[in-house]
Image: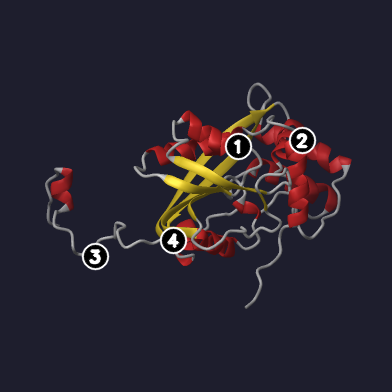
Amino acid sequence: MIAPPRLFDWPLRRLHLDRALRAGHRADFLRRRVAEDMAATLTGIVREFTAGVDLSARDRVFEQALAVEGLSERVQVVRRIDQAGSGLNALQTTEIPALEAESSDLVVSILSLHWTNDLPGALAQIRRALRPDGLFIGSLFGGSSLQELRWALGQAELELSGGAAARVSPFADAFDGAGLLQRAGFALPVTDIDRLTVTYANPFDLIGDLRAMGETALFAERTRPLTRAVVARMVQLYGERYADADGRIPATFEIVTLSGWAPHPDQQKPLRPGSAKTRLADALGVREEKL
């Protein structure tokens, strides 16, 4: 079997997360938003999850979101996989989750899957760890994320260096999330996309937040260092193309959320084509006209 290409340096990922932990909660607003959305999703599922696993437990944002929704008793996180070495009850040293087969009824991953060299393999491992009718919810940054920074850096390097090196990680762009979940063995796969824009006084504040998030690039193949001239031109181009009337610059974050269930005989099944017993026109209350 051919191994997937190694795009990201996983040990460097650990170092970035260690640095993010030392920065505290200054830039955890995206993770908290995702955790709150996941908790809100679980409020609509009438069942208990007593063996939950958090694969992105740099902190307790998911458990805090559960508490706010009043779900702490019904949804219990019994294991947290630490990706940054902060002494939680399990330590993840590789990108493939260290989980036993059919050991969990809920697995969540908050904004970490985009750093995975082998996303299909990671999803297959998560599926293997779920008990029948267990649920997976995971989020990752999508391809539109940081499109403004990507353009400004690339244009600045083209102008001053004659070629643009990869500076911003290649987030999942227009990929078939539901298809990946199905390939990994999940039932009832769903993909949701949430795009938001955050404004900053200047690109340096944006880069500071990315460092505090642990989200700066970590390519396995090192690129040449940025020069001061390129950075200065990037700042100029960013402002010229994107700044608003107050001089603030936008940064796009696209959050892709994947969810799927481990198969179980009692789960809802899709209807066979042609098996519907009610016409669409009747359901919509409209008159059907023949052409």
Amino acid at circle 2:
Arg
Q: Nearer the viewer, residue 196 or 53?
A: 53
The secondary structure type at the circle numbered 2 is: helix
The residue indicated by pointer 3 is 273
Tell me how far mark 1 sits from mark 3, CA to CA. Answer: 44 Å
The answer to whether marks 3 and 2 mark residues whose Cβ atoms lie closer than 8 Å is no
| Tag 2–tag 4 contact (CB < 8 Å) | no
Q: Which residue is mark 2?
A: 22
Q: Is residue 109 visible?
A: no
Q: Is residue 263 left or right of residue 28?
A: left
Please give the residue where the numbered disc 4 appears in the rendered image.
186
Residue beneath the point at 29% across and 56% down: 268
Which of the numbered marks, if any, corresponds to residue 81?
none
Residue count near mark 1 (Cα–Cα under 10 Å), binned few <14, some 14–19, many ≥20: some
Structural distance between the alpha carbons of marks 3 and 4: 21 Å
* Residue 212 percent across, percent down from the top left: 73, 36
* In this picture, residue 67 sits left or right of residue 272: right
Amino acid type indicated by mark 3: Pro
Whichever of labels 2 and 4 marks the residue nearer the N terminus, that label is 2
Looking at the image, residue 61 lies above or below residue 117:
above
Q: Residues within 10 Å of mark 4 (few under 14, many from 20)?
A: many
Q: Is residue 49 left or right of residue 225?
A: left
Give the spatial CA distance, label 3 vs label 2. 55 Å
- For disc 1, the marked residue is 60
At numbered mark 1, what does the secondary structure look like: helix, strand or loop?
loop
- The kind of residue tagged 1 is Arg
Q: Amino acid at mark 4?
A: Phe
- Say which of marks 3 and 4 sits in front: 4
- Considering only order in the chain, which callout, 2 or 3, is on the residue closer to the N terminus? 2
Q: Nearer the viewer, mark 1 or mark 4?
A: 1
Q: Nearer the viewer, residue 243 or 26?
A: 26
